[in-house]
Amino acid sequence: MNKKMFKKLGALCLMSASAFSVTAAERPNILWILVDDMGYGDVGFNGSTDIRTPNLDTLAQQGMTFDAAYNVHPFCGPSRAGLMTGRYPHMFGSQFNLPTSDISGGLGIDSNETFISKTLQNSGYYTGVVGKWHLGETAEFHPHQRGFDEFYGFLNGGHSYFPEKFKPQYEKQREQGLNLAIFPYLKPLEHNGKEVDEKEYITDGLSREAVNFIEKAADKKDQPFFLYLAYNAPHSPMEAKQEDMDQFPDIQDEKRKIYAGMVYAIDRGVKRIVESLKATDQFDNTLIVFWSDNGGRPPLGASNHPLRGRKGSALEGGTRTPMLFHWPEKIKGGQHFKHPVSTLDFYPTFAGLAGAEVPKDKKLDGVDIWPSLKSNTTPRKGKMLYVMRHRYGFSEVSARRDNWKAVNIEGKRWELYDIEKDIGETTDLSAKYPNVLREMVAEMEIWSWQHTQPEWFHIHAEGVQWREKSMPRFHETFTLKNQ
């Protein structure tokens, strides 16, 4: 038996005793796979019956799935801001998506906020981001300034998928001298600050570049990697390859079929990436995390079943998404974690696994969930998880504490649910448990006192409306009108 085989056999024999324990010499590679606008019910491991995701399902079966994984906001930009900083975006003025102008008005996430990527980079990780950034487009907010060694993708909030379609449109607008007015979804992708001529369907191109990064990382023998793979699929525009849509002959609804094809392309990409990790002997010590930035959009083909609500909503369908962890060396397969977790928890959890030193002045709103995963216990007993989205003239807010979920419906009334028993938010218990609701609303109001005013608005009209309505009007938000 050669030395390598003996080492692997020994690791298998010790699996049950060493599962979940991590030493400095075992720092994992960390691969974050984030998808955009995927519904809770749109992967096989979460119960999808019409969309097949065999490769993601395999990772789920071999790892741990999360029944109650939440984002901090039901929109792309604030969700990503929370992910990277480990803080609620409301605390530093990132409650809205960045402006839609060509370079987001020169704005971006506060440079004083240390991203998880920077913390990992400082601890010796080789770091890369592939795909959608959406956290600032000017030089000071570029991925290279936020802790990433490599960047391939686009800086704005989305992109068209077929180069043969978006390239001619881009060139036409340039010829017309529009330049700054060019729709960002049409612009060339970049690699480390230089424009590239992407020739593949965008999802396939991003999968390819993820593989390229993994192969580069394999040459850095003493340096673990952190790769943030941010697919823009299945976000609009709704564009799928015909051969991917052909995988779903039983889906008759055209929007659902296109959406299914876009999800299938992600799943195909995951297969390529897993094969690359195995080929470079990095698979066993790579922690793969998969989730969506917020809920899906049913009008565009997504399904959040069995949840109520959709992208943009403080209901479950707005921020509760599919999630899995896969790490052969440390996570036993077939596990389901039922307790609520947040993407805020990624920062402290993975900094801990990496043995990375978090800056002493760094504020974090999440918790290290690794001990809870080991013991299968809740990481935040009695503590709240919040969601807030501002609308025209009112704020939509919700919070979860243990089995309870309190939510403000359209700024008009409060409802209370036992969310462990009633995942679909069908039976309002506010009249039966008024004290529970009152306590939760009071705690939410205290949380809101820590918020700052928005640093920007997605579109100019939102800023005008904010001032017209004297927002955020929290004195109305946290009034129990139905009590």
Image (cartoon, helix red, strand yellow):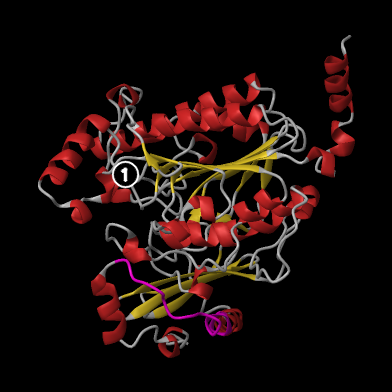
Q: Main secondary structure of the magenta part?
A: loop
Q: Position of residue 261 (x, y in %)?
A: 34, 31
Q: Quick one: label 1, few (<14), some, or many (20+) residues within 10 Å?
A: many
As shown in the figure, which amino acid type bears the numbered disc 1? His
Mark 1: which secondary structure?
Answer: loop
> In this rendering, would 215 be left or right of 17?
left
Q: Position of residue 36 (x, y in %)?
A: 42, 47
Depth check: 465 or 250 in front? 465
- 246 relative to 471, above or below: above
Check the picture and name the quadrant holding the N terminus.
top right
Depth check: 90 or 433 in front? 90
* Residue range corresponding to the magenta coloring: 444-458
Depth check: 275 or 225 in front? 225
- Whether residue 51 can be seen here: no
- 249 relative to 302, above or below: above
Q: Residue beneath label 1, please? A: 159
Q: Position of residue 358 (x, y in %)?
A: 72, 61
